[in-house]
Image (cartoon, rainbow, N blue to C red):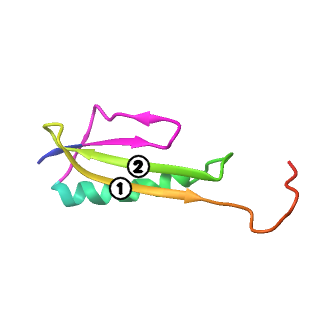
Amino acid sequence: MPRFYFDTDDGDFHYRDEEGVVLSDAMAARSVAINTLPEFVRNRDFAKDRYAFSVHVRDELGNSIYLTKLALTGGWQAAIVHRT
């Protein structure tokens, strides 16, 4: 079975996967990449209103085979005073 590598980027930190994961095929790797994105958002303290998260999948030869991204944006909709 093939090995796939999942490089991640949360806008502040880039991680290059050197270990990889053995999966049945590229569709399984796609599923892992997409399901990784919500983990970026979970249990995070957001200091900004814009974030871009990505998971880049490479095959055993280092070829780029899949890229998935999640953009998170927010902004105040009313003129209010934000207090910390």
Q: CA distance from mark 2 to mark 1?
A: 6 Å
The mark found on residue 15 in the picture is: none
Disc tally is: 2
Which badge, 2 or 1, is on the more N-terminal residue? 2
Q: According to the image, label 1 marks what residue?
A: 68
Give x and y (percent) for residue 71.
Answer: 50, 57
Does residue 69 appear to the left or right of 5 in the view shown? right
* Viewer-side residue, 49 vs 6: 49
How busy is the neighbourhood of tag 2: few (under 14 within 10 Å), some, or many (20 plus)?
A: many
Q: Residue at x 85, y 48 (%)?
A: 84
Q: According to the image, label 2 marks what residue?
A: 54
Verify whether residue 6 appears in magenta. Answer: yes
| Magenta region | 5-23
Quarter of image, res 63: top left
Q: Amino acid at mark 2?
A: Ser
| Residues at circles 2 and 1 in contact by the CB criterion of under 8 Å | yes
Does residue 54 appear to the left or right of 18 in the view shown? right
* Viewer-side residue, 10 vs 76: 76
Element carrying mark 2: strand
Q: Residue at x 75, y 68 (%)?
A: 77
How busy is the neighbourhood of tag 1: few (under 14 within 10 Å), some, or many (20 plus)?
A: some
Element carrying mark 1: strand
* Residue extending furthest toward the bottom: 78
Q: Residue at x 18, y 43 (%)?
A: 59
Give x and y (percent) for residue 82.
Answer: 85, 55
